[in-house]
Image: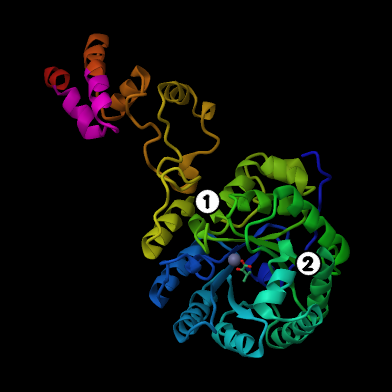
Amino acid sequence: TSREPVRVNIRPTRHDLATGRDPNRVRIFDTTCRDGEQSPGAALNAEEKLAIVRQLAVLGVDIVEAGFPAASNGDFEAVRRIADTVGNRSNPPIICGLARATRGDIERCWDAIKGAAFPRIHTFIATSDIHMEYKLRKSRAEVLQLVTEQVTLARSLCEDVEFSAEDATRSDPEFLVEAFQRAVEAGATTLNVPDTCGYITPDEMYHLIATLRERVPGLRSGDVILSVHGHDDLGLSVANFLAGCEAGVRQVEVTVNGIGERAGNAALEEVVMALYVRRQYYARAFGLDEAEVSGDQPKQLTNVDYKEIAKTSRMVSSLTGMTVAPNKAIVGSNAFRHESGIHQHGYLRNASTYSIMDAQLVGVTTQAISLGKLSGRAAFRSRLAELGYELNDDELNRAFLRFKELADRKREITDADILALVSDEIREQ
Ligand code: KIV
Ligand code: ZN
């Protein structure tokens, strides 16, 4: 990286100490069951949320935003059950509930989460002029007063309080700094920068985070954790998060498969795997010793168990009914498949020619080579060998010609098709 490394030394929290997690990792705050559920048609009932949160705990996320308890009695009950159960398993995640900056929301949220071993209240209010004028109909002074009052209330109930300045990235930076200063004075332990409308660019995010670290007390000393949240309206959310991490962010708010309001939220699997695959790059950006993230037992920049990613993705897709696009990074059905003959040939000689990560690392077991009209002889021979058949050159040539004829008519060739194609040769074997 051409940027100066930014080293962050976060004071270990009670949760870090109890679960043995590195305080300086990038914390994964999963909001699949809150912001993810805000995808049209993706509503989850309590049982479904519980199943997802159980799996998120196995995946190793640090914080689960289980819902918005003041939104409905059903959501209150779901959050309460999650706090009382998953929130008390061994090595539990923090269980968080969302609340607007009002007494009613904050008290309702606390009632829902207080049974967890590590509860968190996440309260928010908008700080952009457009939101304050048209949505809240409040002046800047009124908003600042609410930040002080409501964060103080939340902190009187719960030791772990996150404050979000909604639409932070379209807010006047001077006012954003003031709102965050107020939140820290009132006891917030995490400050979140939401890119609510998916508007910011990575470079702007980097500079905004640098400004906040410079100006807001508690961020440089590591007493307060800086977080980003973002939507994918311009397809930039993951890039924005990674730029934020380079500038000192140590919590990212993500959803599984990137589901969420409008174009969705930043995808958990993409941020996590970028931090893993490019760990040397991020080690340098974080001011770490490169030796710590190379070698046999590299230090992990997140707490996620990568091999649980594919299973978590499938579960969220089936319970929300939100199908994953085949070309979706990391978890799409084509993410680890190679189609063209040139790619297949290279991949079969050495997987690294066209692959930057091992599918099995994230729990994907699909075939790396898909057979179709672009496939070459090498891929065809290799698939036959995997199916247990070694043909001599003549047999292979005959079968390959038949394969190409079929591939011109049929988009994808299955194992059954191949076995039918080579049945003559097989019978003679
Ligand atoms: O997008 C957003 O601003 C939010 C906040 C409530 C954090 O989801
Ligand atoms: Zn959001």
**Can you give x and y, in whole percent of width and height, for residue 237 in the image?**
62, 53
Nearest the viewer among 146 and 347 is 146
The N terminus, quarter of image: top right
Residue at (53% x, 79% y) in the render: 83
- In front: 65, or 35? 35
Query: What residue appears at the point 82 percent right and 77 percent down from the top-left corner?
Result: 182
The residue identified by callout 1 is 306
Label drawn at residue 81:
none
Residue pointed to by mark 2: 11
Q: Amino acid at mark 2?
A: Arg
Point out the stretch of residues depicted in magenta: 402-423
- Mark 1 near ligand 2 (CB under 8 Å)? no
Q: Position of residue 198 (x, y in %)?
A: 63, 57
Q: Nearer the viewer, residue 204 or 342?
A: 204
Q: Amino acid at mark 1?
A: Tyr
SS class, disc 2: loop
**Residue 54, how many percent across, how many down?**
46, 68
In the image, 277: left or right of 246? Answer: left
Element under label 1?
helix
Q: Could you tell me which quadrant the C terminus lies in?
A: top left
Could you tell me which residue is drawn at 79 percent across and 84 percent down? Answer: 145
Question: Residue 188 lies in what quarter of the image?
Answer: bottom right
Query: Crowding near pointer 2: few (<14 within 10 Å), some, many (20+)?
Result: some
Q: Give the quadrant of ligand 1.
A: bottom right
Give the image quarter of residue 356. Answer: top right
Q: Is residue 190 left or right of residue 272?
A: right
As drawn, 385 above or below 294: above
Depth check: give the residue in front, 139 or 111.
139
Task: Give the residue displayed 12% in from the left and 17% down from the top.
Answer: 428
Label 1 and label 2: CA atoms lie apart by 26 Å
